Amino acid sequence: MEWWLQLLLFTFGYVTCRTFYFFRGAQSSVQMLQAAQLISLAMLARSIENFAYSKSLRLQYMAETKASEQNKKAFMLLHADELKSFKTKSIQHIINLHPKFFRDALDFDDWPSGMRFLNKNQALIAALLKDTQ
């Protein structure tokens, strides 16, 4: 074989290898990014469960200490505002951490769409968190 043909064949093989390596790396990056999104959404959902538990404990304590209805309503309003703020800020923080070229990989943009994304991937998140329970 001519030397230039060998050089051309080597160059073609090298470029092909680098191209496939890039595409495989990009696919792995997106998969890791989605797994991180699912884990963070699952942790946020669990923290919301703890919010609800603390709310019920506080209301139980207020009932035992015979707190006024006005205090109970004020607590309920403050708790609802704090919960709404927590949901909004946490989702916005996750979105802001993504570089612009990965924004297309986001399947959610607010709390309800984040929870839909989490529910759609319940089997994967159950497998990821299986050992931690």
Image (tube, grey):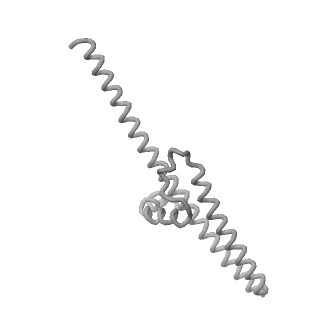
Query: What residue is shown at x 62% (from left), y 63% (from top)?
Result: 88
Give percent across and percent down for residue 114. 52, 62
Vertical position of residue 116 compared to residue 53: above or below:
above
Quadrant location, the N terminus: top left
Q: Is residue 100 left or right of residue 2?
A: right
- Snapshot quadrant of residue 49: bottom right
Vertical position of residue 50 compared to residue 68: above or below:
above
Vertical position of residue 59 compared to residue 130: above or below:
below
- Snapshot quadrant of residue 12: top left
Note whether residue 21 is visible. yes
Query: What residue is shown at x 48% (from left), y 53% (from top)?
Result: 35
Query: What residue is shown at x 60% (from left), y 51% (from top)?
Result: 96
Give percent across and percent down for residue 31. 44, 49
Note whether residue 65 is visible. no
Q: Is residue 16 left or right of residue 76?
A: left
The count of marks equals 0
Q: Is residue 32 left or right of residue 46?
A: left
Query: What residue is shown at x 66% (from left), y 78% (from top)?
Result: 56
Give percent across and percent down for residue 86. 65, 64
Give percent across and percent down for residue 10. 31, 21
Q: Is residue 2 left or right of residue 20?
A: left
The furthest residue to the left: 1
Question: Which of 104/89 is in front?
Answer: 104
